[in-house]
Image: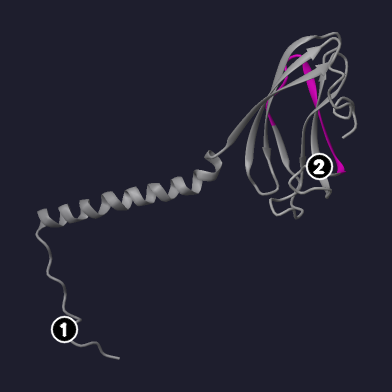
Amino acid sequence: MDLPTSAAKPIAALPAARSASVAASVAAPLAAAVAASWLCLAGPALAQTTVTRSETVPAGKQARLVIVPNLKKDCSSGPMPEIKVVTPPKSGSLITKAGKLKTPAKYRCPNKDAEVQAIFYQPNSGYTGSDGVVVEIKNSDGEVEKRDIRITVDKAGDKAKDEKKNGTDL
């Protein structure tokens, strides 16, 4: 199909000064748009939440610090959560375990069987005092949360706390 001759005519060239001005006025917003699109792509990685909490651990005992199920927000099963230690404890060690548990009745997905990842803290022999750990958790929905856990290793321990949490079981 032939185009009409008027459409095939070349466009007159703009004077050099004007074309540079037009190019600059197009380039600046284009560069800003490209930069903004990169920031949007990087957004989820930057939108990380940090949760700080305290735990009391009896001296010489192991205690669970973190437990994360493989459940998505819609309560369907997803990939296993990924736990990365950012700052290890200074006066103890961390033990990771995987297993299967039923979620508690008060959980957002109550009484659901789920695969879990857990982190336990074991204080050094004879140690009492303060310690801490920072971990990053990537859940089954791909969201990353940083947890800053401040630990107090106590001689007597707190008997009122959930006994299931203090020990080696998930």
Quarter assignment of residue 85: top right
- Residue closer to the observer: 164 or 92: 164
- Residue closer to the observer: 168 or 33: 168
Which stretch is magenta?
85-101
Q: In which quarter of the image is the C terminus?
A: top right
Q: In which quarter of the image is the N terminus?
A: bottom left
Q: Position of residue 97 (x, y in %)?
A: 84, 35
Against 16, is 8 above or below? Answer: below
Say whether disc 1 or disc 2 marks the residue closer to the N-terminus. Answer: 1
Q: Is mark 1 on a helix, strand or loop?
A: loop
With 77 as the anchor, is 100 left or right in this view?
right
Quarter assignment of residue 138: top right
Amino acid under disc 1:
Ser
Q: Residue at x 84, y 17 (%)?
A: 158
Q: Position of residue 166 (x, y in %)?
A: 87, 25
* Gap between marks 1 and 2 measured at Cα: 70 Å
Against 13, is 59 above or below? Answer: above
Q: Position of residue 37 (x, y in %)?
A: 42, 51
With 51 as the anchor, is 124 left or right in this view?
right
Q: Please say which color scheme the image uses.
A: one colour
Amino acid under disc 2:
Val
Q: Residue 116 got which mark?
A: 2
Which class describes the residues within 10 Å of circle 1: few (<14), some (14-19), or many (20+)?
few
Quarter assignment of residue 82: top right
Pair 1/2: label in front = 2
Q: What is the tally of numbered marks visible in this picture?
A: 2
Which residue is denoted by mark 1 in the rendering? 6
